[in-house]
Image (spheres, rainbow, N blue to C red):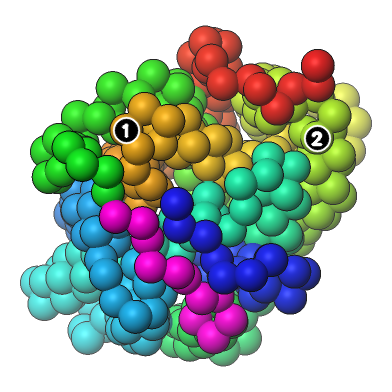
Amino acid sequence: MLRVVGSLGFGRKLAYAMGGIALNLANLVISQWLFVRYVPSEQAALVPAAWFGAFLMLGRLTDAVTDPLIGYLSDNTRTRWGRRIPYILFGAVPLALVFCLLWTPPVGHQHWFNALYACALIQLYFLLYTAVCTPYLSLLPEISPDAAERINISTMQAIFIMVGTVVFGGIGIILERWGWLAIGLVVAALTLISFVPTVLVIRERPPARPPAGAPAGLVTWLKLTLTNRPFLYVVVATSLYWIALNLVLMLVPFWVTDYLGLKKDAVTLLMAPFLASNVVFFFVVNVLAKRFGKYLLFLITLLGSALVIPLVTLVGHLPWGTPFAQSALVFGLAGVPVAGFLVLPYAILADVVDHDEQRTGLRREAIFFGVQAIFQKSAIALSIVVFGLLVHVGAADGSALGLRIVAGLAGLACLIGFFVFLGYPLRSDRPR
């Protein structure tokens, strides 16, 4: 069984967890702002909206297809640095560079070259993101076999994810003051900085040789992964949640500009209560998960989001406060269950990896994260298509009907995820 050399003290946990800054920041920025960069309106679009939506969907699907392949390669890599570190070491710089270039389309008006440029770079970005982040995530089950410590590591990682999310919340201000290129430079720099500690501090031991007769080959490993019953419950529930979360993130800037009639920098003000409630409830989720178990807390996460996110549909119809105040309250409430989603899934998937080792005799961390990505990123691609169809409905009359429908669909996805996850069988971390 592969383990990090020596006991994992606070410093090593911190070094690993810092990668959380990059883990979600770039994807959040792309989800919320890249569509705005290339399609600010139908009249000023650098690429036709339908085309650009298709490029993003294709990128997510490319990402999904390559994830299990990268996972399989990483699980079977043998180097003096280990199975995961080489991918992070050699992939982080190209990833940062491509992200930066995404924000600099070559032509200042709608043109076929913008379409070609955007399509190529989006596919390359998602390929490089997979090559770095799947091996990075696969280190978590190797760091500690203890369920409580995994929750602690996931919580530390979630704190750094929140650092990235705070930067994400300030993107509107960065855009208003310094422009689109500044977004690319800031996020690219943070991507590099956040992965450096993992490369420098975490050391892997060579993995044990597979037992005689152990299953081999990509196709066989995929079949084993897809027949792991606990994994299927996890992957379906988390994919549904990603649909909801991506819809909400894409909704915010259009809600600010099209419905509230404010400038883009107001996105930061609207995201502030969301981020604040996230920070507070990271620690609440950590304590409650250790007391009541990850299973129960993730069910609460799903159900809470299903109840809170659709409240966006009521903004402007409540008897108190301005539409902005009502919006800030709703997004602040939405941040509470989202904290659970940022802390729990990776620790839950680590339990699934342990369960798989009992079945197969193999440590196959990366293939699980890779196969999970097929479903999750396909779900995100679907959310992009749905959003593109609804975003401008009701914009002309100021009702924001399409955006309200988006919020309702996000809540529905979480509710379905709740009922799916009820069947998850691995609940051994609950108190006895």
Q: Residue furthest front?
A: 212
Q: Which mark is residue 290?
A: 2
Between discs 2 and 1, the one toward the N terminus: 2
**Residue 70, above or below 381:** below
- Foreground residue, 67 or 72? 72
Q: Which class describes the residues within 10 Å of circle 2: few (<14), some (14-19), or many (20+)?
A: some
Coordinates of residue 384 in the picture (x, y in percent): 35, 43
Q: Residue at x 81, y 54 (%)?
A: 279
- Foreground residue, 26 or 373? 373
Say left or right for 49 vs 409. left
The magenta segment is 199-209
**Residue 353, above or below 65:** above
Q: Secondary structure at mark 2?
A: helix
* Quadrant of the image occupied by residue 164: bottom right
State the residue position of label 1. 360
Q: Residue at x 66, y 60 (%)?
A: 157
Coordinates of residue 317 in the picture (x, y in percent): 75, 25
Q: Which mark is residue 107?
A: none
Whether residue 23 is visible, yes or no, is yes
Q: Which class describes the residues within 10 Å of circle 1: few (<14), some (14-19), or many (20+)?
A: some
Coordinates of residue 318 in the picture (x, y in percent): 81, 25
Q: Residue at x 77, y 69 (%)?
A: 10
Coordinates of residue 113 in the picture (x, y in percent): 11, 77
Majority SS type along the magenta span: loop
Amino acid beneath label 2: Lys
- Foreground residue, 243 or 83? 83
